[in-house]
Amino acid sequence: MTPIDKEEALNYIKLLAQQRVVTKNELETAFNSGSGVNPETDQSITKKLGISEILYYIGGAIIFLGIAVLIFMFWSSFSNFTKVLVTLGSGVAAYIVGVLFGRDDRTKSVASAFFLISALVIPLGLEVVFYQSGFNLSTPGTQSLISGILLTTYLLSFALFRKEIFALFSILFGSWFFSSIANLLVEGQVGIDYWQFYQYLIWTLGCSYILLGYSFTKTKLSSLQGFLYGFGILGFLGAAYTLGGWGSSKNTFWELIYPGLVFGSLFLSVYLKNQSFLTWGTIFLMLYILKITGEYFTNSFGWPFALILAGLMMIGVGQMSLSFKKKYLSAN
Amino acid sequence: MKHILKDNLSLILGLSIPVLMIIFVAGSIYLPALFAPKPQINFIYESKENAYYGGETQYSVKNRKIIKNNIKFQEVPPRLFIHDVSKNESREVPFEEAQLLDIDSRSKSSDGYQIIDGMFGGGSLFFSGSYDRGRYLSGHGLNTKISFPADEAENINYKFHFLGWIK
């Protein structure tokens, strides 16, 4: 079979459409059949949150708020057992309710709200249990234990129930665990610039979030991409910006590579078709222009001209960002 | 196997980066300890109670010997301690015993160690740490926190006065 010219095929389809020989749905069905795409499955993969689900999550967050206010108002009058019951007990109860609701197709969406409550309350409950047991909550060792327990629990829950909310909280608790372990390693060490160390932690998490978000493309977890890309690129560019330093403490390596990182982010916004990369890339490019101007031109005759140039560049960056968005991202 | 790696490359990388960072941090902290020579030389220090009342010290080193200075105002007599670096323990010594010792008052010992301040550390990304009130025996990429007697550990930053290394 000879390869069919694309232009010829499209012109033929145009002719058929003009003559009303085929409908749009028939064309779509034929296309899907040929390419092996299942529209029902694809729709479920790329499903966005419906209004009822949003309300479930808001309800869950308000319930959590109610529990937090209850604890705050009456904490001193609770016995130790009551403190554990109100926190860890209600978290575990919400988890069990979520599991039960999740068994029925009619109440599957409601289950997520209860899993959200449990994910917010159980950490509080564990902190209470550890505190009652005599642990010092502010040490990275204790934080590592608590976050490790939560990470294990939610990873197992995701493996069992395959719900997005478990994946989301596995990532969050994993981030907490990672930072606690890193702090445990450097605890008490001298000669470490802790401010820089935290920036490297944030930069690492940013890279990890971006890669995880990309790995979730066209999977059931694609709904988490927005969160992962948004916070990932913010952490990645924000930490790299801070690592560049200022004045006498500036880091030439990070200052030199930073434009590459920012323009890389703008390029990735087109490749990944993601708004967050464009927005944060634009913001940090503007901040970088201001920083370089302030760092190198403040005390020279050229400062006023540098400010004018910086202003013009920022207008240019803003315009470039807008045209990028219209040309490459507005279709989404 | 190759197929699984190729299909999940970004997931594997995303999970590996934090793990690699932990391994790198652990390696940079604990590997020097494996190769650093153990500290050999003990040191002597003064723990002065009235540190708030001026910079004068009861004891100092002259011609490699501990001497007692004439201090006009002294609320609580300062104490002398010899710190055993191999056991990381201090024991109090009377002045009569200390003045017989041969002291090297340089800040760095002949085996490459010195006493440095503690710094801000600990905590996690979400919880602040605390200022480490203490002293560290530092050298060859290794930092060991000095263990002071329980009754001296409080406010040791203000009370500690390094005198010298014991020959």
Image (cartoon, coloured by chain):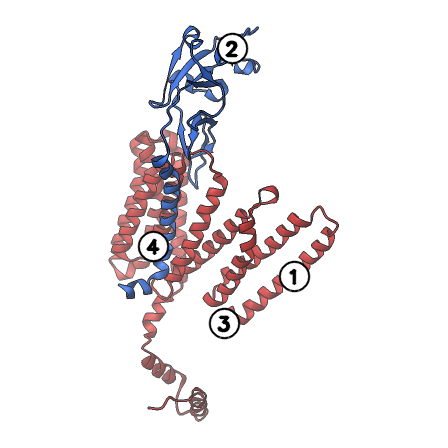
Q: Is residue A274 left or right of residue A53?
A: right
In the image, what residue type sits under mark 1? Ile
Q: Which residue is mark 2?
A: B58
Q: Residues within 10 Å of mark 2 (few under 14, many from 20)?
A: some
In space, the residues marked 1 and 2 are separated at their CA atoms by 67 Å
Query: Which numbered dot is residue A167?
Result: 4
Query: Which numbered dot is residue A315?
Result: 1
Between label 1 and label 2, give the one nearer the viewer.
2
- Tell me if I can see residue A87 in this picture: no
In the image, what residue type sits under mark 4? Ala
Residue A329 drawn at (x, y percent) = 51, 68
Q: Secondary structure at mark 3?
A: loop
Residue B97 drawn at (x, y percent) = 41, 8
Same chain for the residues at labels 4 and 3, yes or no? yes
Residue A12 drawn at (x, y percent) = 43, 91
Query: Which numbered dot is residue A68?
Result: none
In space, the residues marked 4 and 3 are separated at their CA atoms by 29 Å
Between label 1 and label 4, give the one nearer the viewer.
1
In the image, what residue type sits under mark 2? Gln
Disc 2 chain ID: B
